[in-house]
Image (cartoon, rainbow, N blue to C red):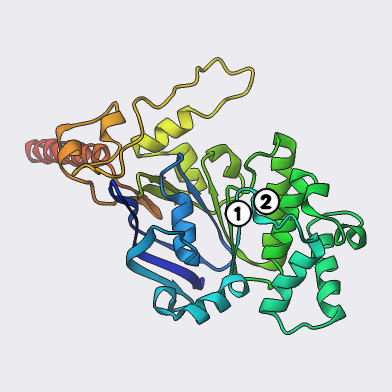
Amino acid sequence: MTEKLLQVKNLRTSFFTDAGEVCAVNGISFDLEKGKVLGIVGESGSGKSVTAYSIMQILSFPGKITGGEVFFKGVDLLKLPAKKVREFRGEQISIIFQDPMTSLNPVYTIGNQIDEAIRLHTSRTGSAIRERSIDLIRLVGINDPERRVKQYPHELSGGMRQRVMIAMALACEPDILIADEPTTALDVTIQAQILELIAELQAQLGMAVIIITHDLGVIANMCDEIIVMYAGSICERGSTDDIFYSPKHEYTKNLLRSIPKTRKSKERLVPIAGNPIDLLNLPDGCAFAPRCRECMEICLEQHPDELPIGGTHYASCWVNVREQVTHERESFADDEILEQGGDQV
């Protein structure tokens, strides 16, 4: 049986503003197994990054975790004292942020910043720290590492800065690496290189990885499982094949329709109608209902429970409930016809 490294149970995170409580993460649950890659997808404001920051407990004011549990190897991280939380960050779980230019300190060299991560979380001392920094820079594919450790962030390209961030995240060989929009602001070629690097390092080091993105196409070939989020909730989860070839939630279907196809494709891009939901005033029913072409009366009145589709595939959508009920009725009617036919024979 595969070991579950991370178990998130009914996690809730809100931002308490002057306008009211913004429910950024609204009771989500998921597991991450050792050596697996999990993708969390959704549009801006869906709660993807807040989920990662809640797990790492690096929320900025006025954000606050209001409920739930986050178990790492059986220990609830949300109940640990602040000192213990600082110890597990970097050592057990590391994160790569969206913009390396705002994450790296412009007045310190690359080497100094990687050195600091190693000094804080490992037992290495003296020259062994710098040797480890050089090894990490070489590991993430940056040439001439002995020279690069003496350079400042502004002397590197965007792709190289992101590689430095990956090197810092790997400094302590964590069990879990969280990549929060790791290809933001990078051109397409560099995006592919960064994603390929993460995949190679994951396979080489045996880490579990959580990749957060707004673009399903970015993670199509990387993930073992994908979670689709909308308005702070999980609307669908399943394997990569489930999500791409058999989507069940209307939001997932809309996301897939909005992905640009090849130049030869004659299909038009279909934008998602309407506006994102106001997290200050979440509806009683499905949050996506006001934008959904298949919306029914119950969608506006009652939030759907997660419905098992098959295997590890789940969706929270009343349309699937309707289809399942219709299928059961048709099967029941077919059975009755067969029974009647059998009696007549």
> Crowdedness of circle 2 by 10 Å Cα count: few (<14), some, many (20+)?
many
Residue 157 quadrant: top right
* Residue 257 point in image, percent of width and height: 46, 28
Residue 173, labelled with which disc? Answer: none
Tell me the kind of residue under disc 2.
Answer: Pro
* Residue 45 point in image, percent of width and height: 42, 43
Tell me the kind of residue under disc 1.
Answer: Phe
Decide: marks 2, 1 in contact (CB < 8 A)? yes
Q: Residue at x 8, y 37 (%)?
A: 340
Compared to 190, does 82 lie above or below?
A: below
Q: In the depicted view, which residue is nearer to us: 290 or 122?
A: 122
**Would you say 270 lies left or right of 89 here?**
left
Compared to 253, does 206 lie above or below?
A: below
Q: Residue at x 34, y 26 (%)?
A: 274
Compared to 104, does 255 lie above or below?
A: above
Q: In the depicted view, which residue is nearer to us: 93 or 106?
A: 106
Q: Quadrant of the C terminus?
A: top left
**Would you say 146 lies left or right of 76 here?**
right
Report the residue marked by disc 1.
Answer: 97
Report the residue marked by disc 2.
Answer: 100
**Would you say 291 lies left or right of 331 here?**
right
Judged from the image, the secondary structure of the residue bearing numbered disc 2 is helix
The number of numbered discs placed on residues in the rendered structure image is: 2
Residue 79 quadrant: bottom left
Q: In the depicted view, which residue is nearer to us: 319 or 48?
A: 48
* Residue 55 point in image, percent of width and height: 46, 65
Q: Estimate the spatial distance between the alpha carbons at disc 2 and disc 1, rounded to whole Å.
A: 7 Å
> Crowdedness of circle 1 by 10 Å Cα count: few (<14), some, many (20+)?
many
Judged from the image, the secondary structure of the residue bearing numbered disc 1 is loop
Residue 301 quadrant: top left
Compared to 50, does 173 lie above or below?
A: below
